[in-house]
Image (cartoon, grey):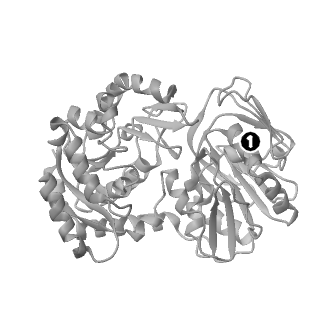
Amino acid sequence: MARAIMLQGTGSDVGKTVLGAGLCRAAKKRGLKVRPFKPQNMSNNAAVADIPGDKAGGGEIGRAQWLQAIACGVAPSVHMNPVLLKPQTDVGAQVIVQGKMFGEARARDYQAMKGQLMDAVLDSWGKVGEGADLVIVEGAGSPAEINLRSRDIANMGFATRADVPVVLVGDIDRGGVIASVAGTHLILPEEDRRMIVGYLINKFRGDISLFDDGLKSIETFTGWRCFGVVPWLKAAARLPSEDSVVLERLASGEARALKVAVPMLGRIANFDDLDPLKAEPQVEVVFVPPGKPLPADAGLVVIPGSKSTIGDLLKFRENGWDRDLLAHRKRGGHVVGICGGFQMLGRTVRDPDGIEGSVIEAEGLGLLDVETVMEPEKTVRNVSARSVQFDLPLEGYEIHLGRTTGPDTLRPSAVINGVEDGAVSADGKVIGTYMHGLFGADGFRGRFLESLGIKGGGIDYRAEVERALDEVAAELETHLDCDAIFALAR
């Protein structure tokens, strides 16, 4: 087995994903063969990892491990994230195991399911370590959730089974970091506590020396060594975000030449489709929270993917966004619907088998003359395509249930693997597609923005991500004792 070190947080959203990606890139720059691993993830932002020999195309993993694979300079694998939970309701989620649909479970039922999932986690763990020098493991939530410890597969349950030392991450930006680190030490059972080899503080703003007394206090309470204090990483804003909690901080942006409005659906999925647009210097992407109208000065509205198309469509109407969207169209505005957003733009969405829930049919937004029928078989694959409108190459992926048909599909938005995809309105201003990653193609994005009156678009987005990863790694090398962290891996 490769040597390994694990990052666990004092809570959710403490920055483990970015730190993990930064450490992966730092290790790669040292010449190490490094891989990412996260036993269990919960996110509706999924990526597709190819499965050798799988005729179906591929399997799903969290976008975080996809990003970390990029940081390592390797192709993503379903074994980097063996268990992925995709929330569909407030109490239930779709369960993906080693890239494939395993079942659906309510939260309480899932706790009972974890025992059999640990076998899959350990199987993937063995495969990820093959041929690697180092594996950077990311936990989920917090090891301090001791009420869930007996069946844990994401934090100490995994660390103790696989004998992986743990670095605890505390987030100073949210406040109470001394109490959160010391409190974690206090309530962990001895078996778990001895797995922790030290801690680091993340997201510090200002003069780091002002926290010297805080570090002394933590040492007094815990006896743990500190590996460093990481400042607020500005480059992290240029990396794809995985967790929808960040959307609350993206509700508005800096005013620019083109405003793109994105309704924050309750089960929003793969919203990192918008990241390449956000990176364009003349584009302002505004995520609109429930209860707020779609801005009247938006030139483009993008309806993103959804893990619950009918449920989000009903909420879309409750928010009055359907009226805002019609007003936007009357003003000559453009609309793009991606995956679930594409399905919503049609006349109806039907779910006769109740795959998404108890509501089996809903009226669509009516901006495209198509209708969608949900079907049990899920399409999961990486694709190469061409834009019909601009005859330019596209690359992306599909993760969707359902089949969409109707007159407007005779005007496809793209040709994917030789098959026509999506639909376009008669005036060309409403576009629907099942392909995620549409805006990631620099040439297409530049021409699309030009069609909206924005010239000079089409930056090298992938190069921007690579530069951001390099900058994060450089900051970690400066502010953390990376030598000590890597040396403690076993």
> Looking at the picture, how far across and down is residue 32, in whole percent?
23, 54
Task: Describe the element under mark 1 as helix, strand or loop.
Answer: helix
- Count of residue discs: 1
The quadrant of the rendering that contains the C terminus is top left
Q: Residues within 10 Å of mark 1 (few under 14, many from 20)?
A: some
Q: Residue at x 19, y 70 (%)?
A: 212
Q: Is residue 107 left or right of residue 182?
A: right
Q: Is residue 265 above or below residue 457?
A: above
Image quarter in which the N terminus is found: top left
User: Disc 1 marks which amino acid?
Assistant: Leu
Residue 129 point in image, percent of width and height: 26, 40
Q: Is residue 165 above or below residue 83?
A: below
| Residue at (25, 58) in percent of width and height | 178
User: Does residue 58 show up?
Assistant: no
Q: Is residue 302 left or right of residue 328?
A: left
Q: x%, y% of residue 429?
A: 81, 60
Residue drawn at x 33%, y 37% as measured from the top left: 154
Q: Quadrant of residue 333?
A: bottom right
Answer with the quarter of the image where residue 369 lies. Answer: top right
Residue 275 appears in the rendering: yes
| Residue 30, image quadrant | bottom left
At x 12%, y 57%, the residue is: 220
Between residue 376 and residue 415, name the one nearer to us: 376
Q: Is residue 406 above or below residue 245?
A: above
Image check: 199 left or right of 175? left
Residue position for label 1 = 314
- Near-viewer residue (233 or 123): 233
Q: Position of residue 277 (x, y in %)?
A: 60, 65
Query: In terms of depth relative to the viewer, which is nearer, 201 or 446?
Result: 201
